[in-house]
Amino acid sequence: MQFLQAVLLGVPMTLLITLLAFAVGAVLGVPLVLARRSALAPVRVAARLVIDVLRGIPPVVFLFVIYYGVGTDVIKLNALQAAVIGLGLIAAGYMAEIYRGGLLAVHKGQFESAAALGMSHWTALSRIIGPQAVRVALPSATTYAIGLLKDSSIASTITATEILYRAESAARGQGAPLEPFLIAAVVYIALGAPLAWLSRTMDAKMRARVAK
């Protein structure tokens, strides 16, 4: 019971890191995907390079650079801030690609119809194309949120007091090398299960609509 209590102390921090990092990624992913689809080739290339860099760097390396580099020499960042910024930037790269997939799923005739009606690019995107793309992207975004929940465990390497950090502390303090980590695994599964169910449900609904 004491191990469970110790691990559960890290749940609020885990959820906070996950939610804030996902929010950062969801917001920053929008300008990235718009730049990725820009009519200007240099903008498209730059956006693709940024996305590839964000997705290509291992999260733990990114967090180390931000926390032990930027967070000490440039501005003062605590573990939570560094984790949210690092994981949020990485999430932005993935969310941009998820958004792009949603946009590509919208039939090009929708774009042509909006243009034929005299709608501006932004009006068509916000009122016609965007809502359809978001519905398509939601299952993938939810699936990514599950991965982000698990990736939040990396924040323990920069002393963020989330689930894995609490499990490691309990293991060291009580001389129990295995039990706290098994409990942590069960807690991660319990936290991710609702998101997994939501992702499958939305995906099934999307497939049913397409089939009609």
Image: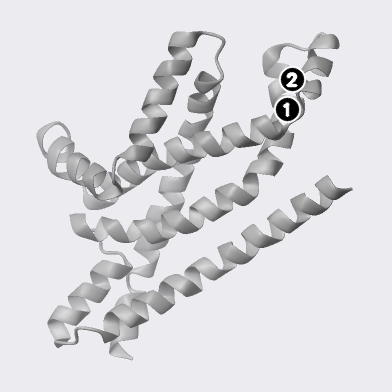
Question: In this figure, which residue is indicated by the disc labeled 1?
Answer: 129
Which kind of residue does numbered mark 1 sit on? Ile
Q: Residue at x 28, y 51 (%)?
A: 80
- Residue 52 relative to residue 35: left or right: left
Circle 2/circle 1 CB separation < 8 Å: yes
Q: Residue at x 50, y 25 (%)?
A: 31
Quadrant hosting residue 121:
top right
- Residue 40 relative to residue 107: left or right: left
> Which residue is outermost to the bottom?
1
The mark that comes first in sequence, 2 or 1, is 2
The image shows residue 193, relative to residue 59, as above or below, that is: below
Q: How crowded is mark 1: few (under 14 residues within 10 Å), some or many (20 or more)?
A: many
Q: Residue 49, how many percent across, how many down?
A: 38, 24
Q: Residue 44, how many percent across, how many down?
A: 48, 17
Quadrant hosting residue 1:
bottom left
- Residue 63 relative to residue 119: left or right: left
Label ID, residue 124:
2
Which kind of residue does numbered mark 2 sit on? Ala
Q: How crowded is mark 2: few (under 14 residues within 10 Å), some or many (20 or more)?
A: some
Q: Nearest the camera: 167 or 147?
A: 147
